[in-house]
């Protein structure tokens, strides 16, 4: 079965990348407006005849502060995104512990990559290796200068040449389909949101530990209300941020793995070799030092997809990778 749909997949990934680029600043600005609205609603109001506080929302005041904040939010996020986007190579290297692989160190891998690149007529990407006994591989990068295929030492030791060709063909297809550009874009966005979430949580913790204590010394009731306000605002902002991370997962179709499997099978000329490689990798997938979920979505097999119980069910619902057994069955039918 010949691999088809290359241009279709490229067009789809280009559209999704643009949608993410447009949606992210909108979501960030929405978070800012909600944050200001909650502060305004909790901080404003009046006492009724029974002495109870009646909260009110001053939309005009919220919009005024929001419009003043827009240039700072857009500018800050834009600069942050550009730095992270163009520093993605070092970011992925740092997260995975990858290093450059020299030809003299492993000519076997270089020969396999070169032969596959000549077969499909693409420029040869950089080759990185992770010193890890576990089995995995991934592609990364946003353009010809940064496209990279990374493999673990465990993968190179356990797989034969045909199986390695199938895995590397799979990763080269991700590059050809521009899957890596979409994934790197989502990783940058999720990284920004995660950083904001950690800052909000840290602010909440510091306020409760220090600000809340000092406020209670001065005004027991006022300090408690202030702490509750900060907690509510922080929880809502974190919930919105978490929703965005799920949104980025939905934007990344599981079909990209089937497309890459089909492309890899075509490149290596042996679908059963790639199926055999996936079966071996599924026995010990992952990278020991990688704890970032956004980076793990680059891997040929997502290691956390093997979690059991409720975590396994939750991961399967929002997984960026299809079930490995289904991928193997698909390859065996080619």
Image (cartoon, helix red, strand yellow):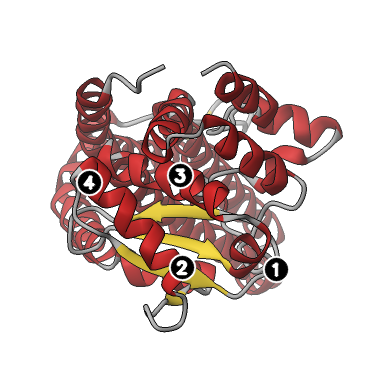
Looking at the rendered image, the quarter that the N terminus falls into is: top left
Mark toward the start of the polypeptide (2 vs 3): 3
Q: Quadrant of residue 302?
A: top right
Q: Quadrant of residue 277?
A: top right
Front position among marks 1 and 4: 1
In depth, the one of 15 and 66 nearer the eye is: 15
Tell me residue 157's x, y (percent): 65, 66
Residue identified by numbered label 1: 133
Mark toward the start of the polypeptide (3 vs 1): 3
- Cα separation, mark 3 vs mark 4, equals 14 Å
- Cα separation, mark 1 vs mark 4, equals 53 Å
State the residue at coordinates (40%, 58%). 112
- Cα separation, mark 3 vs mark 1, equals 55 Å
- Cα separation, mark 2 vs mark 1, equals 18 Å
Q: Which mark is residue 43?
A: 3
Residue identified by numbered label 4: 65
Label 2 close to label 1 by CB (< 8 Å):
no
State the residue at coordinates (25%, 36%). 17
Mark toward the start of the polypeptide (3 vs 4): 3
**Secondary structure of the residue carrying numbered label 2:** helix
Mark toward the start of the polypeptide (1 vs 4): 4
Mark toward the start of the polypeptide (2 vs 4): 4
- Cα separation, mark 2 vs mark 3, equals 66 Å
């Amino acid at each position: 079965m010949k691999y088809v749909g290359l241009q279709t997949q490229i067009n789809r990934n280009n559209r999704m990348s643009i949608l993410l680029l447009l949606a992210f600043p909108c979501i960030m600005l929405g978070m800012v407006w909600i944050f200001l609205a909650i502060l305004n609603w909790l901080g404003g109001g009046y006492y009724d005849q029974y002495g109870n506080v009646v909260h009110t929302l001053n939309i005009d005041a919220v919009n005024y502060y929001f419009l003043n904040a827009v240039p700072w939010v857009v500018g800050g996020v834009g600069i942050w995104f550009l730095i992270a986007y163009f520093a993605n190579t070092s970011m992925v290297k740092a997260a995975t512990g990858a290093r450059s692989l020299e030809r003299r160190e492993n000519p076997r891998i270089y020969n396999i990559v070169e032969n596959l690149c000549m077969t499909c007529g693409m420029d040869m990407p950089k080759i990185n290796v992770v010193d890890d006994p576990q089995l995995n591989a991934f592609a990364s990068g946003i353009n010809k200068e940064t496209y990279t295929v990374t493999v673990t030492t465990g993968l190179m030791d356990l797989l034969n040449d045909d199986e390695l060709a199938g895995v590397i063909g799979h990763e080269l297809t991700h590059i050809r389909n521009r899957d890596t550009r979409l994934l790197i874009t989502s990783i940058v966005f999720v990284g920004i949101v995660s950083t904001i979430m950690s800052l909000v949580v840290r602010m909440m913790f510091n306020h409760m530990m220090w600000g809340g204590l000092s406020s209670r010394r001065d005004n027991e009731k006022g300090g408690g209300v202030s702490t509750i306000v900060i907690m509510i605002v922080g929880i809502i902002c974190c919930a919105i941020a978490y929703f965005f991370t799920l949104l980025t997962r939905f934007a990344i179709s599981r079909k990209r793995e089937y497309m890459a499997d089909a492309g890899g099978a075509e490149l290596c000329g042996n679908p059963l070799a790639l199926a055999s490689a996936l079966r071996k990798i599924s026995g010990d997938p992952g990278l020991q030092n990688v704890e970032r979920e956004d980076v793990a979505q680059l891997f040929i097999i997502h290691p956390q997809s093997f979690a059991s119980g409720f975590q396994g069910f939750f991961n399967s619902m929002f997984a960026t990778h299809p079930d490995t057994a289904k991928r193997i069955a698909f390859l065996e039918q080619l």
